[in-house]
Image (cartoon, grey):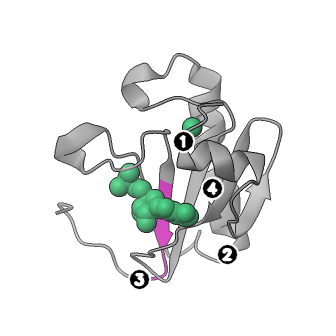
Amino acid sequence: MATDCLFCKIVAKTIPAKIVAENSSCVAFRDINPQAPTHILVIPRHHTASLNDAKDAALIGEMHLMAAEIAKAEGLAERGYRTVINTNADAGQTVFHIHLHLLGGRRMSWPPG
Ligand code: AMP
Ligand code: ZN
């Protein structure tokens, strides 16, 4: 755990979050500033700053499969949803503990802004 990391604190449950799913490797919780009717973040328990630092291919896959399971549970799977990982400044990454955004419940535009 990185002691000054917001998302490590959510994993440790020392700061509150609306957790929607968790398993031995990942935790998913509702984004505090939702950009769509459903906006959930999936994070690994183990601190990794960004996709640039990711080493564990299975873990990156598990994050995506957890997002797909949540999308089904939230009723998004048939109409569709978007999964996004922002990496560093040009993509607008603000929290440096890797997280997968799951966005759904409205029509998404493309290309993204
Ligand atoms: P990014 O810009 O890709 O780094 O995304 C960071 C996301 O974390 C943003 O969508 C924020 O709204 C979200 N966020 C920041 N603090 C919290 C928090 N305490 N609980 C839930 N989501 C948060
Ligand atoms: Zn962290």
- Closer to us: 100 or 97: 97
Disc 1 within 8 angstroms of ligand 2 (CB): yes
**Compared with residue 37, is residue 81 higher up or lower down, i.e. above or below?**
above
Using a 10 Å C-alpha cutoff, classify the residue at mark 3 as few (fewer than 14 neighbours), some (14 to 19) or many (20 or more).
some
Give the CA distance from mark 1 to mark 4.
Answer: 26 Å
| Outermost residue, front side | 4
Q: Is residue 94 left or right of residue 102?
A: left
Say which label, 1 or 4, has the lower sequence index: 1
Say which label, 1 or 3, has the lower sequence index: 1
Q: Say which amino acid is labelled 4.
A: Ala
Cβ atoms at labels 4 and 2 below 8 Å apart: no
Using a 10 Å C-alpha cutoff, classify the residue at mark 4 as few (fewer than 14 neighbours), some (14 to 19) or many (20 or more).
some
Circle 4 residue: 68
Q: Say which amino acid is labelled 3.
A: Arg
**Compared with residue 35, is residue 27 higher up or lower down, i.e. above or below?**
above
**Compared with residue 59, is residue 105 higher up or lower down, i.e. above or below?**
below
Using a 10 Å C-alpha cutoff, classify the residue at mark 2 as few (fewer than 14 neighbours), some (14 to 19) or many (20 or more).
few
Magenta-colored segment: predominant secondary structure: strand
Give the CA distance from mark 4 to mark 2.
Answer: 10 Å
Q: Quadrant of residue 75?
A: bottom right
Q: In the rendered structure, find residue 74 and report the number of the disc placed on it.
A: 2
The residue that appears at 56% across and 32% down in the rendered structure is 60
Label 2 or label 1, whichever lies nearer to me, is 1
**Compared with residue 24, is residue 102 higher up or lower down, i.e. above or below?**
below
Q: Say which amino acid is labelled 2.
A: Glu
- Closer to us: 68 or 16: 16
Secondary structure found at label 4? helix
Q: Quadrant of residue 2?
A: top right
